[in-house]
Every structure is written in structure tokens, then in C-alpha cells.
């Protein structure tokens, strides 16, 4: 064997073999993100989709060597190390369970499931004693440089440069016209699990919770104001955190000037990001309180490796590095559950007209079972 052949063989053995369940719009973004990573990080070995024409187009575009008509055949035939679950939300639970039971780890698109119960069942199907196969959820906006800086500073706690967190705004004000809801799986509790609270604001709520930690109480309203859809098209919530901080959360698909806005007011600085579908360092603004200019220095020197724009490539890099090191990939079950539980709490409060605490969402309760509280809609 020449040195080059030896190197090729080494790369081949260390690359994670990945497969796709679902080859629609977001699968293309995953595949392009994979191709942007260093050679030898991952190799796409197989794909499946309920629609043969989509599967064939995807396989050709991304040089996928094997396609399968069903997931069961893919799992038996290709034996992938990781399956990217890129199907509509209502199918994630069954697909993730099948993959985990076949020994493949799963990276599941958001929302990871359509109820907290389904998510708990996926979590329970992981390998024994915390080992593989693992579940991870796609929350790519945690992996931008600005969010990492903020997380690194916030984790230093009340004695760190930011001081205590006091107030946050988490606003996902997007626009989706009526045609958007023509896709059969959209706008229905059984297939999408909810409206903009579940499908759109989930990313920003994930960022909010990554910074502020556990929530203790939520009061919310939700309504269908303008679209023909079975779910809400707008929701507003106020959330209390274990730290004592408050947050205002708004989720909308009715907002002609679209924006994703997060604002954190800490004792010693306001930290804000304004973006739409992804943020770069330049989208973040830090405003120190009087006498706390040192926050700017701490922000610059926060020990973040790069200022990468948030996106799938950033998360995939970390997921694959973890798997190659036989470690649990991010974002794991505990974080996904905290976000899903807040969403369940928003729906529970909106539907019952009462404030909700996490204990109201314990196993067996209506909003643990489904985001609409069990009643058929
Ligand atoms: N992370 C993000 O920013 C982001 C952005 C958009 C969509 N998403 C999520 O990605 C997922 C897919 O969304 P999309 O926009 O790619 O949808 P899409 O409709 O474009 O693609 C879904 C694909 O899944 C296939 N499919 C459906 N049921 C299947 C099954 N049981 N087995 C195999 N294939 C099946 C469909 O034929 C289709 O090709 C959703 O969960 C969505 O919320 C995430």
C-alpha cells in the first residue's frame, strides 16, 4: 500500500457513516453542510424517502451510493453510525426509535418530537448506561460564535462579568403566507405538533433556555388570527426562571417585517442579537452598564474558537467530532426536553387560561401527552 492509500484507508475507517431519513428541503442543507466539513469527517452511505422521485434527486445531487425504499431496509443494509432524521415532525418518534433500536445514533431535526412523552420515549431508547446509540436534536443556532460567547460569560454566574440575569426578550416574528400551510403536514397538531411556537420560535427558545437555565412558571396566550390553520399562528408568553429572571416570548408567522430578536439584560450589560435565520458575530450588540466597560473585553476574549455564523455546519462539526470520540453528541436529551417542556407549558397555559409550572406537565398529564392537551383538533 502506498502512503496515500494508507491515509485514504485511515480516513475511511474514522469517518462516521451517515444516512438520511427524509430527503426534502432541510436534508439538502444537511448534505451541503456535511460537504463543507474536512474530508474524512463523515461519509453519506445511504438515504430513504417516502417519495422515490425526491430520493433519486437527492441521491444524484449528493452522490449517495445506496438508496432504500424503506427505513427498515436501510438500517439492515447500510448499518449507518448516524441517521439524520429530516422528515416531518410527526414521523420523528417512530423513525428515531427504529434507528436507535437498530444501533444507529440519530440527529433529529426540530422539533425533535411532537410531545414531551414522545421525546422521553426516544431518550429511553438510547444505549444502556449512557452509552451509544445516542439521540441529539438539531438546534443549530447555539453554535454561532456570539451565542457561544454569551453562554461562556453567563456560565460564570452572578460573580462573572455579566452579573445576574434579570430580563430577556425572545421574539420570533416571522411571516408565512397561506400557501405555506398548503403542505399537508403543516398547521396540524397531529403532524407538526403546533404552530410558530413549536415550529419557528423553538430555535430562539432553545437559545434563551441555554443562557437562562430552568424555567419555573409560564403564563401565555395563543390564537389563530389570520391563517387557515388548525394550530395557533401567534403566541405570547411571560416566563419566570429559577434564577428569578423574567422573559417575554413572542412567536408569530404574521409579521411582514420579519425578525428574530433576543435580548438579555444582565446586571452589568445588555446583550442583544437581531437576525433572521442565522446569526454572525456582527449581529450581536453588547451595551455595558455604567462602570462596566470590562464586559466588552470579556466578550472579545470569551475563549470561543471562531466567530462562525450559526448554522447546520457548526452543529454537525461538533456532533461528528463527539461521535468519532465515542462521546455523547450535542444537543442532548436534557436540553431538548427543557425546550419542549417550555413549549408544552406555553400551550397548556394558553389553552387552560392559567399559569403553568413544570409539575403540571408530569408524565400522564394532558400536555405531556400532546401539545394540544389530548383533545382532537
Ligand atoms: N433546523 C431548521 O432550521 C429547520 C428548517 C426547516 C425545516 N426543519 C425541519 O426539518 C424537517 C423536515 O422539513 P422540510 O422542510 O425538509 O420538509 P420537506 O417536506 O421538504 O421534506 C420532508 C421529506 O420527508 C419525506 N418523508 C415524509 N415522511 C416520511 C417517512 N415516514 N419516511 C421517509 N421519508 C418521509 C418526504 O417525502 C419529504 O421528502 C421538519 O421537522 C422541519 O421542522 C428544520
Image: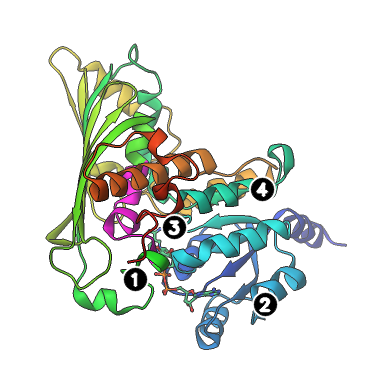
Mark 4 lies within 8 Å of ligand 1 (Cβ measured): no
Q: Tell which of 69 and 121 is nearer to you.
A: 121
Find disc 2 in the rendering and name its residue.
Answer: 65
Image: magenta residue range: 192-206
Q: Find residue 94 and report its image quarter.
A: bottom right
Which one is closest to the eye, mark 1 or mark 2? Answer: 1
- Residue 114: mark in rendering: 3
Callout 2: 10 Å neighbours few (<14), some, many (20+)? few
- Residue 126: mark in rendering: 4
Main secondary-structure element of the magenta-colored stretch: helix
Spot the residue most to the bottom: 53
Task: Give the mark, 3 or 2, whose residue is nearer the N terminus.
Answer: 2
- The image shows residue 39 at horizontal and vertical percentages of 62, 59
Task: Give the mark, 2 or 4, whose residue is nearer the N terminus.
Answer: 2
Residue occupying image coordinates x 66% and y 80%: 68
Callout 1: 10 Å neighbours few (<14), some, many (20+)? many
The CA span between labels 1 and 3 is: 12 Å
The CA span between labels 3 and 2 is: 32 Å
The CA span between labels 1 and 2 is: 31 Å
Task: Give the mark, 4 or 1, whose residue is nearer the N terminus.
Answer: 4
Callout 3: 10 Å neighbours few (<14), some, many (20+)? many
Amino acid at each position: 500500500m502506498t502512503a496515500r492509500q494508507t491515509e485514504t484507508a485511515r480516513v475511511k475507517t474514522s469517518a462516521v457513516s451517515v444516512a438520511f431519513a427524509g430527503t426534502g428541503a432541510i436534508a439538502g442543507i444537511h448534505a451541503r453542510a456535511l460537504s463543507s466539513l474536512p474530508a474524512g469527517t463523515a461519509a453519506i452511505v445511504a438515504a430513504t424517502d417516502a417519495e422515490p422521485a425526491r430520493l433519486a434527486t437527492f441521491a444524484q445531487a449528493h452522490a449517495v451510493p445506496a438508496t432504500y425504499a424503506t427505513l427498515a431496509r436501510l438500517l439492515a443494509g447500510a448499518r449507518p453510525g448516524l441517521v439524520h432524521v429530516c422528515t416531518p415532525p410527526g414521523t420523528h418518534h417512530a423513525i428515531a426509535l427504529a434507528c436507535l433500536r437498530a444501533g444507529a445514533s440519530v440527529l433529529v431535526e426540530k422539533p425533535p418530537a411532537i410531545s414531551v412523552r414522545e421525546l422521553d420515549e426516544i431518550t429511553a431508547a438510547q444505549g444502556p448506561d449512557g452509552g451509544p446509540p445516542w439521540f441529539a436534536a438539531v438546534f443549530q443556532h447555539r453554535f454561532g460564535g456570539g451565542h457561544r460567547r454569551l453562554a461562556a460569560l453567563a456560565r460564570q454566574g452572578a460573580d462573572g462579568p455579566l452579573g445576574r440575569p434579570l430580563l430577556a426578550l425572545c421574539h420570533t416574528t416571522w411571516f408565512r403566507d397561506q400557501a405555506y400551510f398548503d403542505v399537508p403536514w403543516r398547521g396540524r397538531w397531529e403532524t407538526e405538533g403546533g404552530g410558530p411556537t413549536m415550529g419557528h420560535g423553538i430555535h430562539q427558545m432553545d437559545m434563551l433556555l441555554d443562557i437562562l437555565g430552568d424555567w419555573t412558571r409560564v403564563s401565555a396566550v395563543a390564537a389563530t388570527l389570520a391563517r387557515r390553520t388548525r394550530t395557533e399562528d401567534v403566541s405570547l408568553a411571560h416566563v419566570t426562571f429559577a434564577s428569578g429572571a423574567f422573559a417575554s416570548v413572542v412567536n408569530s408567522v404574521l409579521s411582514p417585517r420579519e425578525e428574530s430578536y433576543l435580548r438579555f439584560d444582565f446586571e452589568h450589560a445588555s446583550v442583544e442579537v437581531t437576525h433572521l435565520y442565522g446569526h454572525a458575530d456582527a449581529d450581536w450588540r453588547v451595551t455595558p452598564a455604567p462602570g462596566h466597560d470590562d464586559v466588552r473585553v470579556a466578550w472579545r476574549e470569551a475563549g470561543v474558537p471562531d466567530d462562525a455564523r450559526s448554522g447546520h455546519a457548526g452543529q454537525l462539526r461538533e456532533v461528528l467530532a463527539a461521535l468519532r470520540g465515542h462521546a455523547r453528541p450535542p444537543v442532548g436529551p436534557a436540553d431538548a426536553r427543557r425546550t419542549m417542556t417550555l413549549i408544552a407549558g406555553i400551550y397548556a397555559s394558553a389553552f387552560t387560561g392559567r399559569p403553568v409550572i413544570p409539575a403540571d406537565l408530569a408524565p400522564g398529564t394532558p400536555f405531556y401527552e400532546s401539545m394540544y392537551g389530548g383533545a382532537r383538533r
